[in-house]
Structures are given as C-alpha cells and as structure tokens.
C-alpha cells in the first residue's frame, strides 16, 4: 500500500555500481518503492561540484548507473527515475534559496572541510562546492519530499534542508492578512472538524503537545474540500509560523552496508576491492578464490580464526546459520580448506548476480527503452518541480503580470 509520503533520493553518477551499492543503497530503495511515492535521480550537477575538470566522463557514468539501478530491480513502474539537470528548476530553486542562506550555515556543514581535506588533489575552493549542500536542499524541497534515505554522511545535509525550509517559510510565509485567511480556511472544514482543529492547535500552542500536531496534520490531510493553499496555511497556523510553503523533510538513515570488500575493508572503488554488478562470472570466481584469508593460516593444516578473515564477513552476508557453523568449526579445527570455505560464498554471489546481469544485458541492448524510462520520469518530476517553483516565485513576489 502506498502512503502519501514522498521519498526522494539522489546518487552521484560514479559509473558502474558494485555489491556495496546493492546491499547498502539499492536494496533499500527497492523496498521503499513498494511503500512510498518515490523519486530517485542521478545527481549529475553534484558530480560537477567535485569533478568539474572531467565533466565529459559524467554522461557515460550516468547511463551505466541508470542501467545498474534497473538491473538491480528499481522499478520505473513504482518510482520516478530522472536526471537532475533535465529539471532546470532545481537550479532556479537553488539560486532563490541562496539569497536567504547565511554563508556560515554552509561553511559549518561538516562535509565541506572534510571533503576539501580528503580530495586535496582537487581545488575545491569554489563557489559551486560550497553550495553543494544547498543544491541538495533544493533537490529535496522542490518535491516536497518528507523522507530522504541517505547514509550517515548525508544526515547533516538533510538537517540543513530543514533549517532552510524553516527560514524560507519564516521570511516569505507571512502574507498580509494571514490570520484572517487562516480563520476563514478553518470554517471551510465544517463545524466538527473546525472545532477539533482549534482544540488540537490550542493543545500544541499552550502545552507543546506534539501528538496533537500529528493528529491535526492527519486531519488536514483528510480534508478533501480544502484547497492546497488553505491546507498549507492551516499547517502553518497550527505551529504558529506563517504559511508552510516548503515542508521540512526527515532523513531516513540507511543502515550502513554490511558488505565488505574483498580485503575486508568497506567495499569501495577507491580501495580497489569491489565486485561490480556486471562483473563477469569468471572474474567473480577468480576474485573470490584469490581474496585474502586469515594471514596466520599459511598451510592447510594450520587452524584458522574466522574473526580475522574477510571471507567470514562475506559468510555473514550470504550464508545460513548451518553454513556458518560449518565454517567456524571447520576453520578452527583445520577441518576444511579455505577454497572449500569460499565455495558457498562464490555460489551465493553468482546466484545473486545472475538475474541482475540478465536484466542489465536486456537494458544494454535496448538503450531506447532506458532513455524512455528517464524521459518519462523526468516529465513526472518536472510537473511537481514546476508547481513548487510557481508557488515559490509567487510568495517571493516574482510574478510580473
Ligand atoms: N549528496 C548525495 C551523495 O553524495 C547525493 C544527493 C544529491 C542527494 N541530492 C540529493 C541525496 C538529495 C538525497 C537527496 O550521496
Ligand atoms: Fe577464512 Fe574460511 Fe579460511 Fe577460515 S577457512 S581462514 S574462515 S577462508
């Protein structure tokens, strides 16, 4: 069942995805798409903020990534898939938000200094890089997303987004005669609901009762005969601010991926320890057979310790309790060899990748279909983005007819 909640997330086009992306991000998207109204996009402008000097490789990466999403099971029938730069409204909202964003808020975002330190070989003392989190805020606010699945490192960006939304609503949400229009809107709900709304508002304003806010929000959602603008007014009136134009999103923290790389570190392209989703099966076998094991287990007769072995971590992801018992026992007693121990993992990875690779091949051979999926997703996204922008321009007084 779909809730009303809208989920939005973006991914920088880094090229072909690997099992770390699959177990960390994609499986999560795939489960969200059944439950929510999902928008997933390729953050190509975000890639530019750090890779402006090799912008020409972005386009290849975009299509590779989209094919991997589809291959993994992200379903264009359930989620809108699109490319950020196809929706120039993101840039317009970014610009307008930049006018009310204090410089200090951006300088304080933890990733700003971190990334500059980490990517020392690139000159990141640019205007675009400083504005990166604000561009992300525009991505989120333009769709009125209320849930944003992100990793730990992105939570601060969602927090910034909430602050920006609040600030924007504070500056632009106070139309003249707000109180009067709000009271008129309450009347439109009918006697019973109007009374309930007023009681809930009082409970919140006088006693800070958050449950009352929740109930009142649900009540407003259910009012079929309220225009969207009236509903927004009443949401704002409820909490004592002006009309809510931009709504505050909430981060949905993606559990850290348990998928280790071939060397036991986090799987990542920069560690050169990945198995890509479209890795040739022979290469998968080869990589797993040659991956390191407990370094103390030199000879077949030496007992080993799974706790210091990267293969054991793969068993945690892929194997049943029974197989894991067999591994622990066999390793510690030197009853099994390392190649034998790896075999169930090899089988599971191949089995997991098989249907994925089959779908990837279909999409690789039908690029037109991939383009259509993206252009349909972009159209749906643009509809929502345009509406938000119209409203934003209007409250800012940027309509000149
Ligand atoms: N900054 C995100 C990352 O590097 C990608 C991203 C861009 C994003 N815009 C977004 C994620 C909006 C969630 C919502 O992973
Ligand atoms: Fe690692 Fe398995 Fe070898 Fe033990 S038997 S060291 S768990 S690969």
Image (cartoon, rainbow, N blue to C red):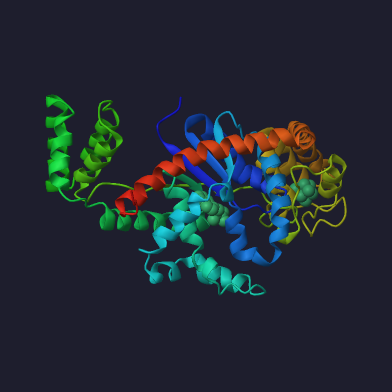
Residue 319 visible in this rendered orientation of the protein: no
Figure quadrant of residue 103: bottom left
Which residue is at a point 26% across and 56% down the rendered structure image?
Answer: 170
Which residue is at a point 79% across and 59% down the rendered structure image?
Answer: 295
Figure quadrant of residue 118: bottom right
Q: Where is residue 145 in the image (x, y as percent from the top left)?
A: 43, 43
Figure quadrant of residue 372: top right
Q: In this view, does 185 lie above or below 54?
A: above
> Looking at this view, is 309 or 231 the one in front?
231
Which residue is at a point 27% across and 41% down the rendered structure image?
Answer: 232
Residue 48 visible in this rendered orientation of the protein: yes
Count of all numbered marks drawn on residues in the image: 0
> Looking at this view, is 217 or 143 the one in front?
143
Which residue is at a point 71% across and 64% down the rendered structure image?
Answer: 54
Q: Position of residue 9 (x, y in %)?
A: 52, 46
- Side (left or right) of 340 relative to 28: right
- Side (left or right) of 187 relative to 6: left
Q: Which residue lies furthest to the front in this view?
A: 401
Q: Where is residue 401 in the image (x, y as percent from the top left)?
A: 33, 48
Q: Where is residue 125 in the image (x, y as percent from the top left)?
A: 56, 75
- Side (left or right) of 225 relative to 19: left
């Amino acid at each position: 069942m779909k809730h009303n909640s809208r989920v939005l997330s973006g991914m920088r086009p880094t090229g072909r995805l690997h099992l770390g992306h699959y177990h960390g991000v994609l499986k999560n998207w795939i489960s969200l798409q059944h439950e929510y109204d999902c928008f997933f996009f390729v953050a190509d402008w975000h890639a530019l903020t750090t890779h402006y000097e090799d912008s020409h490789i972005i386009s290849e990466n975009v299509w590779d990534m989209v094919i991997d999403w589809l291959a993994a099971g992200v379903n264009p029938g359930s989620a809108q898939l699109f490319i950020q730069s196809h929706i120039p409204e993101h840039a317009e909202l970014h610009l307008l938000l930049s006018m009310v964003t204090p410089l200090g808020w951006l300088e304080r975002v933890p990733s700003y200094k971190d990334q500059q330190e980490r990517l020392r070989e690139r000159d990141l003392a640019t205007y675009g890089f400083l504005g990166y989190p604000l561009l992300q805020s525009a991505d989120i606010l333009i769709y009125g997303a209320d849930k944003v699945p992100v990793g730990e490192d992105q939570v601060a960006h969602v927090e910034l987004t909430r602050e920006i939304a609040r600030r924007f609503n504070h500056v632009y949400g106070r139309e003249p005669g707000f109180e009067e229009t709000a009271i008129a809107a309450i009347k439109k709900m009918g006697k019973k609901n109007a009374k309930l709304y007023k009681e809930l508002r009082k409970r919140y304003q006088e006693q800070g009762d958050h449950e009352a806010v929740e109930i009142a929000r649900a009540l407003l959602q259910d009012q079929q005969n309220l225009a969207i603008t009236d509903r927004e007014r009443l949401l704002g009136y409820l909490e004592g601010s002006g009309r809510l134009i931009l709504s505050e999103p909430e981060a949905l923290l993606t559990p850290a991926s348990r998928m280790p790389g071939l060397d036991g570190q986090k799987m990542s392209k920069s560690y050169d320890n990945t198995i890509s989703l479209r890795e040739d099966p022979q290469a998968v076998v080869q990589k797993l057979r040659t991956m390191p094991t407990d370094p103390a287990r030199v000879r077949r007769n030496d007992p080993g310790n799974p706790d210091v072995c990267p293969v054991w971590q793969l068993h945690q992801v892929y194997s049943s309790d029974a197989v894991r018992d067999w591994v622990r026992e066999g390793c510690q007693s030197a009853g099994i060899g390392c190649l034998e121990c790896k075999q169930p993992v090899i089988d599971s990875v191949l089995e997991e990748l098989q249907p994925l690779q089959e779908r990837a091949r279909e999409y690789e051979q039908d690029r037109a279909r991939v383009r259509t999926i993206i252009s349909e997703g972009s159209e749906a996204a643009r509809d929502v983005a345009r509406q938000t922008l119209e409203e934003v321009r209007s409250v800012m007084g940027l309509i000149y007819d």
